[in-house]
Image (spheres, helix red, strand yellow):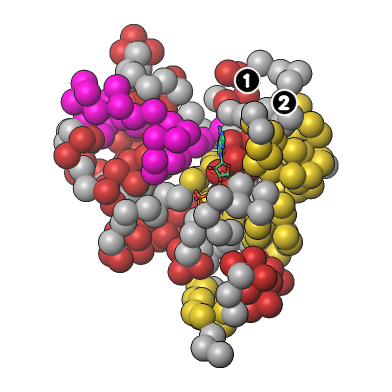
Amino acid sequence: MEAALELDDVTVRVVGRTLVTGADWRVEHGQHWVILGPNGAGKTTMLSVAAAVRHPSSGTATVLGRRLGRVDLRELRRSIGLVAASQRLVDESLLEEEGATALTVVLTGHTGTSAPLWDRYGDEERERAHRLLADLGCKDLADRRFQVCSQGERARVRVARALMADPAILLLDEPFAGLDLPAREDLIEALEDLARTRPGLTTVMVTHHLEEVPATTTHALLMRDTRILTAGPVGEVLTGPDLSECFGRRLRIDSLDGRWYARALRV
Ligand SMILES: Nc1ncnc2c1ncn2[C@@H]1O[C@H](COP(=O)(O)OP(=O)(O)OP(=O)(O)O)[C@@H](O)[C@H]1O
């Protein structure tokens, strides 16, 4: 069966620098992956290939059965939901400048644009946007300006926006950045609910902290120095030895009720 995402010996280079080296990775439909690794390991670059934002310099990347370099990327991107806390992958500046409401931000997910295209949104789209805000636990935010929403509220509005186009795959780049503990837990709960209520949805999330890995995560990929160190079922990969090698520190890993916790071992 066709994979949701398949990278075969993918290397990504920019002038004078390699960002990802020889990545082989296969994600099946309905799986939920987390990518972990130290700063600069190449995690966001991997996600940008999966999002059809960046092409491999060599090797092949196939997203939802379509090989990058051979298909219309704009069309492919419509099947991909992308959530990024920073401006690195999604540009939110226009929406902020124009004083867009949370509902408007979600609506722009329908057209995959960074500004609203009003003639493309009818009653059906508005209803759907309201429903998605409710699914993410923020139905009262519809009329609030996105700019004044808290970091936690914005994080959930971004996920609602990404779901607006009913994507087959949802990619999240550090969605917990800047969130306090309750906001983090709310977002984790929202992501776990999504995994349970949309069994066909595939997700890949880049994060820095093991504590942020939702209990519904099925697989993990560890990166270090532009390379994949290991990838596989979450219980086999999120181990003390593998994570210690990945982060270059001796770590102890604990798991409770499906969630994960890491701390450094004192020598
Ligand atoms: N266009 C570019 N030109 C030069 N270097 C780049 C470019 N894009 C990314 N890099 C560098 O490539 C490395 C990998 O970047 P990437 O964003 O994929 O890492 P990351 O694992 O997501 O890091 P972090 O955890 O810090 O977000 C970093 O050192 C980054 O500075």
Residue 40 shown left or right of residue 90 in the figure = right
Which amino acid type is marked by label 2? Leu
Give the secondary structure at mark 1: helix
Question: Residue most toward the top?
Answer: 119
Q: Residue at x 64, y 29 (%)?
A: 15
Which amino acid type is marked by label 1? Leu
Q: Which residue is mark 2?
A: 68
Q: CA distance from mark 1 to mark 2?
A: 7 Å
221 within the magenta span: no
First of labels 1, 2 by sequence position: 2
Whole-percent x, y for residue 17 in the image: 66, 37
Q: Which residues are magenta?
A: 79-106
Q: Which residue is mark 1?
A: 73
Whole-percent x, y for residue 130 in the image: 30, 35
Q: Residue at x 57, y 79 (%)?
A: 251
Q: Residue at x 46, y 69 (%)?
A: 211
CB atoms at circles 1 and 2 under 8 Å apart? yes
Does the Cβ of the disc 2 residue fall within 8 Å of ligand 1?
no
96 within the magenta span: yes
Reply above or below: 248 against 220: below
The quarter of the picture where residue 253 lies is: bottom right
Reply above or below: 230 against 111: below
- What is the number of the mark on residue 115? none
